[in-house]
Amino acid sequence: MLKVDHLNVYYGESHILHDVDLEVAPGQIVCLLGRNGVGKTTLLKGVVGILPARKGKIYFDNQEVTALPPYQRAKLGIGLVPQGREIFPFLTVHENLLVGLEARKDNLISVPNDIYELFPVLKSMLGRKGGDLSGGQQQQLAIGRALAMNPKLLVLDEPTEGIQPSIILEIENVIQRIKERGTIAILMVEQYLEFAWRVADYYYIMAKGSVVAKGPTQGTSIDSVKEHLTV
Ligand SMILES: Nc1ncnc2c1ncn2[C@@H]1O[C@H](COP(=O)(O)OP(=O)(O)O)[C@@H](O)[C@H]1O
Ligand SMILES: [Mg+2]
């Protein structure tokens, strides 16, 4: 459903991504690993259209999207949960979720109930300002907002970063439930390997802007992967 083909992305004159190939199948959960600064966020931004491709192509749902701006990719079904969450602090929880509806094709005007089923905590806080929530609640809100777009591919950038263990388990539980439904694929950058291994079907490891290893998580030991990640 997502195919990244020889993607090259630059910041100005700095060449950050070098011929990156990556695929995500429908319903598949793919984790993207690598040390800080190797280009994981840059790759996700290339996938969602925040950064342009200098060379290479991106296909989504059998359609080339390389030249499409982010809002058009969102309409096609690519939903992003950005690193650092980036919810709207001065909007309420409910208003933040409504923003997610904007990107839908079907003009739905109320937040689907299944989002509250996945995140009961959000339902109890609808009138609170986003900025007043805890870090873990903000992450749940950011995921809820992306799900409100009704995505076919959910792109998550370090969902457990800076979040306390009990909330990490809740987020893992939500990802497991999304996985069981089998209707949404996930591409996720994650530093917490045990978590990534429990949820992901497939992994990619990046170093210096290139993919250096990949494979199914099942049958691959976390220790063998760690070798690529330690300095
Ligand atoms: N806005 C920017 N302008 C210039 N260089 C950037 C910018 N953002 C990131 N970079 C550089 O691009 C490289 C990859 O960054 P990033 O994709 O954020 O890494 P990761 O997410 O793997 O930690 C790093 O060397 C970083 O310094
Ligand atoms: Mg990053």
Image (cartoon, rainbow, N blue to C red):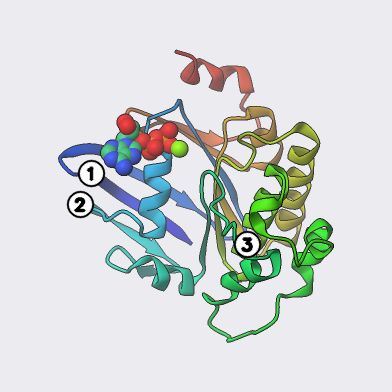
How many numbered tags mark residues here? 3
Residue 17 visible, this angle: no
Q: Which mark is residue 184?
A: 3
Label 2 and label 3: CA atoms lie apart by: 29 Å
Q: Is residue 216 above or below residue 185?
A: above
**Residue closest to the eye, 206 or 105:** 105
Please report the residue visible at 60 percent of the width from the left and 53 percent of the height from the top.
28
Q: Amino acid at mark 2?
A: Arg
Please report the residue visible at 27 percent of the width from the left and 66 percent of the height from the top.
67
Please report the residue visible at 18 percent of the width from the left and 44 percent of the height from the top.
12
Element type at mark 2: loop
- Residue highlighted by disc 1: 10
**Residue closest to the eye, 108 or 40:** 108
Label 2 and label 1: CA atoms lie apart by: 7 Å
Outermost residue to the left? 13
Residue 64 visible, this angle: yes
